[in-house]
Image (cartoon, coloured by chain):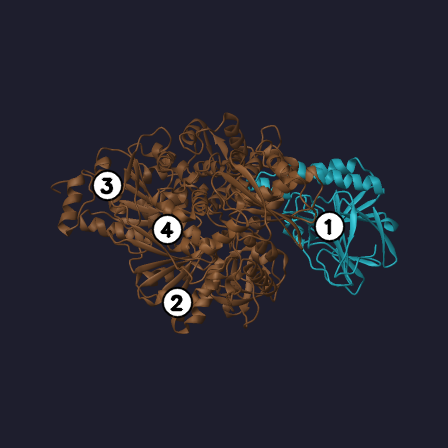
Amino acid sequence: MADAGPDRAAAWFAALGWEVFGFQRRAWEAYRDGRSGLIHSPTGSGKTLAAWLGPLTEPGQGPGLKVLWITPLRALARDTARSLAAAAEAVDADWRVELRTGDTPQSARTRQRRRPPDALVTTPESLSVMLSYADADNLLGGLRCVVVDEWHELLGSKRGVQLQLCLARLRRLAPRMVTWGLSATLGNLEQAMAVLLGPERPGELIRGAVPRDIRIRALVPPEVERFPWSGHLGTRLLPRVVQALESGGTTLFFTNTRSQAELWHEALCAARPDWRDSIALHHGSVDRAGREGIEAAIAAGGLRCVVCTSSLDLGVDFSPVEQVIQVGSPKGVARLMQRAGRSGHRPGVPSEVLCVPTHAFELVEIAAARRAREAGRIEARTPPVLCLDVLAQHLVTLAVGGGFTEAEALEEARATHAFAALTDSAWGWVMDFVTRGGEALSAYPQFRKVVREGDRWTVADRNIARRHRMAIGTIASDAAMTVRWSSRNGGRLGTVEESFIARMKPGDRFLFSGRLLELVRVREMTAWVKAARRGGRTVPRWQGGRMPLSTELADTVVELLADPAGAAGPEMAAVRGLIEVQSRWSRLPSPDELLAERVRTREGHHLFLYPFAGRLVHEGLATLLAWRLSRRQPATFTLSFNDYGLELLSPDPFADDAGNLPAALDPGNLADDLAACVNVSEIARRQFRDIARIAGLVFPGYPGSGKTARQVQASSGLIFDVLVRYDAGNLLLDQARREVLEGQLEFRRLRQTLQEAGKRRLVVVDTPRLTPLAFPLWAERLQSQVISTEDWRTRVRRAAERLEKAAGRGKSDDHAADRLAG
Amino acid sequence: MLPIDWLGERLHLCAARALYWRRRRTLLVADTHFGKDAAFRRAGIPIPVSAMEDDLVRLGRLVDTTAAERVLVLGDFFHARPTPDEPFAAALERWLSARPGVEVCAVPGNHDHHGGAGTLPGLVRWLPEGVVEAPFVFRHEPAADPAGYVLAGHLHPVVRLASAARDRLRLPVLWLSRDVGVLPAFGGFTGGAPVSPAPGDRVWAFGADEVLPIAVGGEPARA
């Protein structure tokens, strides 16, 4: 080993004829100098080697575990381990790289504890499990470096919070350890680094030297309707999408929801039956073995197209992927960039994403995504704070793993971003929760979980310890129901959200994993199904469909609409007709104005408002407005909302909107008014499911877990009810309400929307009929009222034709199969 | 209390999830699952003790208002095998000593077979499953019986009532079908399972302080 550190790494690059990028050298040098930091650059630009070669080429290291490499997905772990091992071999480092995930057999784990590898690739959950063994300090005490891969994926979630706590523990066990994060571009990189390292810890933010060019292109239909409605434009573009797939290489075909993925997969297979074997379907509900098979086939270059959801947003380096297609709204700039980056994994080659709009306004969103990216307007990810459920779980983990002292654990918690502001009383409550079951004053006899042994808190009961370890890995999972064949030996097809199956009756059909299935029966969290013959069907709707348009993208959409002449590009040219009608009948939205439209139809009096703040905010705002307006004048409203705005429909005329609206939009008293009109408690009861699981109030059932485990199973809803009634001061209930406000109602963004609305000029326009902006809201409401999809389509199309006629063009497109409209 | 007539017997439906059979001075309840809260606490899940205490208070109030002389539990009296430190045993003893002349009987349910049945012999009289008190047969699991009309528990029946979009109501029910009647679960810390009554069945929902007939299959139920 002649030279070491950065020079040795550079020599290896030179031997391969590779150029060392500046950011890689900076990372190696920072590591050599004992610093921590965050490296951000697009996928495929050499981030991995920037983080890995530092520790790998460090001179004078002994045996034992030196590097912990944390990846958010266990599907990624194997590939990562392989590429780390290959690099180790290439620089002649005699390093063993091993895997430690939920799939690692017990024998391998035992061997790893006895004879530790030099580097271990693992997930946040498996790290937590490692800390739950009493000999954790033997294995982890010699760590030199922990690398958190794809940190942006963890930053905004409770898994990230769990990891922050584990890192704080590791820093105590291994004081010489440095921390490095790898991240895609985010709007809040400085904060991302501070969260990873812990506040107050210095670090180096290293930007990848080669920001790859990303080309965002839209599949512009030859003719764009001026009265768009959700969903149906996509299939008209089917022939051109098929054409785009002709061009060799693998295409990743991203959709926004799993139901869209199912429908497009079906449509593509129907259009080209000869491709059936080379078009795959990949989403989070497809069985894991099936997904891994698909991932292997992509890597081998054997597939023409993979229809997928966010399930393939990150991860494995798929070199054969040459094209990325995004169907439907990009929703956010960072998300679109991430997806675009999945193609052309060669440095210097631009990545390209082809966007397929499913209605006309999405053309504007595509143009907006391009503009926002050029302007560097990238979304931030907000790291959650004070998740007491995660803290409670972590304390039990430490107690199981040999115990903790209260002073140490509190110091570690407060060293994290998530718990830096933890109050003494909240800490006291969590300690009571894990040691006595609840507040010290109320009696919880028989409760024993974490008990005192000398100055340490430990778990003495082996059953509790075992159950806790089994539950650690469950933060990420949804309440999912297994789908199995009722015949064919009960083979497993995947999982589907319980709420979807709960709405179905035996005999109902649905499309799942590319197959048409019939529900036979539901028992013990399993949906038993059989193959169904063709016929009407429902497509499972997963929660993912509710993601709102980001603020960055929405603001840019308003900018483009306000000044369409100033925006070049084929997308804006294609929607010229739509914009012309909108400005003729009403006005164009603009950053300085808040546009409202009033129109009277046979249905009644409509009030439309366009804050452009995303559908979650509009849902809350519609409810709030209806409640506030009806306090002044008793009325019944029907509500509708989308990413651009909301609609209030009333059988009676609105009294003096211009006077009442500003008062109804007042940000004052927002929290109280919202609590009065939204049933926060009922939503919180559902939100409590995750919290109860993380805090150890419910166990997932396991096969073979026996009678005792079955006797302590209760639904989180039942536990929520009992706590509300008998332990109202339980801080986990507060947390559920807070999560509902922040996550489901986007309270902060709602308040900001109202504050900004006060600064904008409110313009109320009486329009002769539904405008292009109003029409999709109308159609959306109709969809929730009309029972059959066919009726809905017929009625919406008829209405669109009438409006087209009124707008001065008689013809309307004849589109026979709008199968994607549902 | 809502009186109904069933097979020539008058039964009073009590909102606290019980059925009072006045002719036999018997209060019928099902699925008390006593000790469930303690079982959870022993497993490290903090459930407040008040849940069980509340159940006994509720049962006491029912006995006091109806002047029942007997409480008959249709199975799943215990949730799990009672342990020596089971707080319920002492609580039940206090409850009984405050009400001399009241007897607590139970038919065993599937949870009692885990070791609950036969315990607390001084406090609880265990009856054989399927005991006949014409016109009724008392069992835990609902299954038709030639010996009479079966009153049972086990299912924890609830119905969902839909109202506003984000508002849903789940209410425990008494569900009387042709051969078998299923009582709502009494225990406050028990879940519920939605049931689908057939047309012709009769169903009553137990609200906070009122019992209401529920329409089945479009036909309004007659109380």
- Quadrant of the image containing the C terminus of chain B: bottom right
Taking the image as shown, residue A619 lies to the left or right of residue A385, namely: right
What amino acid type is highlighted by mark number 4?
Ala
Image disc number at residue A23: 3
Chain letter of mark 1 equals: B
Name the N-terminal-most of marks 4 and 3: 3
User: Which type of secondary structure does the marked residue at label 4 adopt?
Assistant: loop
Chain shaded cyan = B
What amino acid type is highlighted by mark number 1?
Ala
User: Which type of secondary structure does the marked residue at label 2 adopt?
Assistant: helix
Question: Residue A635: where, in percent of width, then height?
Answer: 70, 44
Q: Return the residue nearer the eye: A413 or A559.
A: A559
Q: Which dot, 2 or 1, sits closer to the camera? A: 2
Can residue A73 be seen in this snapshot? no
Please identify which colour was used for chain A in the image: brown
Q: Could you give the CA–CA distance between mark 3 and mark 1, rounded to whole angstroms?
A: 70 Å
What amino acid type is highlighted by mark number 3?
Phe
Residue for badge 1: B30
Q: Residues within 10 Å of mark 3 (few under 14, many from 20)?
A: many
Q: Could you give the CA–CA distance between mark 4 and mark 2, rounded to whole angstroms?
A: 27 Å
Q: Could you give the CA–CA distance between mark 1 and mark 4, rounded to whole angstroms?
A: 72 Å
Q: Return the residue nearer the eye: A79 or B148.
A: A79
Residue at 60%, 32% in the rendered image: A669
Mark 1 touching mark 4, by CB under 8 A? Answer: no
Question: Residue B108: where, in percent of width, then height?
Answer: 71, 52
Q: Are marks 2 and 1 on the same chain?
A: no
Residue for badge 2: A242
Name the N-terminal-most of marks 3 and 2: 3
